[in-house]
Amino acid sequence: MIIGICAKETGLNSPVADRFGRAECYVLFDTETKEARTIENTAKNSASGAGGRAVRLLDENGVSVTLAPELGPKAMDAIKAFEISAYSYGESKTVKEALENYEAGKLEEFKTNSTESHHGLRRV
Amino acid sequence: MKIAVLSGKGGTGKTTVATNMAFNFKGAVLVDADVEEPNSHIFIKPRVTGEKSVYKNFPLVDMDRCNLCGDCGRFCKYNAILPAKNKVLVFKEICHDCGGCEIVCKRNAISYEKREIGKIHSGKGLGDIEFIYGDLNVGEVSGVKIISELREMVSDNEVVIIDSPPGPSCATVEAVEGVDYAVVVSEPTPFGVSDMKMVVEMLENMKIPFGVVVNKAGLGNDEIYDYCSGKNIEILENIPFSEEIAKLYAVGEMMCLENSKYSHYFENIIGKISKTVK
């Protein structure tokens, strides 16, 4: 199984990212080989809909679980449609810490989007 | 003749200039194309006699035809269409209605459905001004489609004054496209001048002749005059910073309607434009 963690930098010691769809990169951890590699987030500069595009990128890289800071409504729709599980890394500071907390069963799964639409998309 | 009234910074006096110009220009049609936040109607006070909805298309995917090849998702720059595992997600509110996904789909699986994004209102206002304005629904991303429909509603034979959106955005480009002349309204403050430079660059790129109206003249500094004389940009008029003008604006009254002593500013602007645009 491959776990994709939103990260600011390369590797397991990287700080976790503050955003999902516009995270700098994703650290991909293979739970069988215990190896990690980092991919650039090619969705991060999208004009719109970065969250959905990022989910697609994770899917293309074989990710079935992602650890994220927040998930917006479009990213959540995409997570469901790609059948990926997403967990909030909560207080975890680094990718390594987030992984350890996930493996210890301490992270909460996103069942619905954790943030609302941004910009003018928010309905009043 | 079509004249756009625009600005770099918001709140510099586009609506003040556009409405008072229309009031002093016999037979002119006023179009409020600042559809995200239209406010000319507050001053023009139209009796709205016409209203129509503006629609935008979004894609519908026929899953009997779709083979989830992913072409539409790779094509869409805005990520409005996203092929997933057994279905295709469509985020209709970020779709720009470009029609591209239908073109790249080899299986002819895409058709379109329309949804309302806003309205266009029309009617006659104070001073018998023929007036139309667009109003983008709350929560919508782009008013470009409404502006393009507003433009289609006026004929080339009329004198049309367009109150444009602020800044050099997509919506502004749509509003000023094809006009004969543009009036850039700026205040003589550092912010006003800095933001004005961006629309000046936009107008130069679009090859649209333009002049500058300095509103709230007396505030700030002389940078705007140095900049304009350095670039050979005509200053059409200086409208002074005045408490009386501000008060009239705050209660939604056109300054020329309340006091004809203000009319000469706008007659002067119109006169100078008429000399430039034949």
Image (spheres, coloured by chain):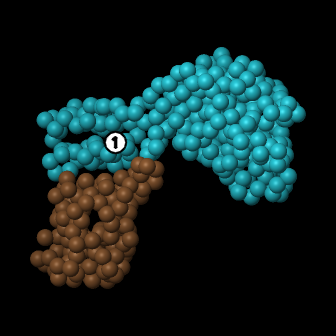
* Quadrant in which the N terminus of chain B is drawn: top right
Which residue sits at x=42%, y=56%? A118
Where B85 sits versus B211, above or below?
below
The image shows residue B183 at horizontal and vertical percentages of: 72, 37
Which residue sits at x=34%, y=42%? B92
Helix, strand or loop at mark 1: helix
The image shows residue B20 at horizontal and vertical percentages of: 75, 32
- Image position of B30 (left or right of B24): left
Q: Chain coloured cyan: which letter?
A: B
Which residue sits at x=71%, y=57%? B191
Judging depth in this view, the residue of B102 and B215 nearest the camera is: B215
* Quadrant in which the C terminus of chain B is drawn: top right
- Image position of B30 (left or right of B96): right
Query: Which residue is disc 1 drawn over?
Result: B92
The image shows residue B140 at horizontal and vertical percentages of: 44, 43
Q: Chain coloured brown: which letter?
A: A
Which residue sits at x=34%, y=49%? B79
Q: Which chain letter matches label 1?
A: B
* Residue type, numbered disc 1: Lys
All told, the count of numbered labels is: 1
- Whether residue B204 is visible here, answered yes or no, is no
The image shows residue B223 at horizontal and vertical percentages of: 81, 55
Q: Residues within 10 Å of mark 1 (few under 14, many from 20)?
A: some
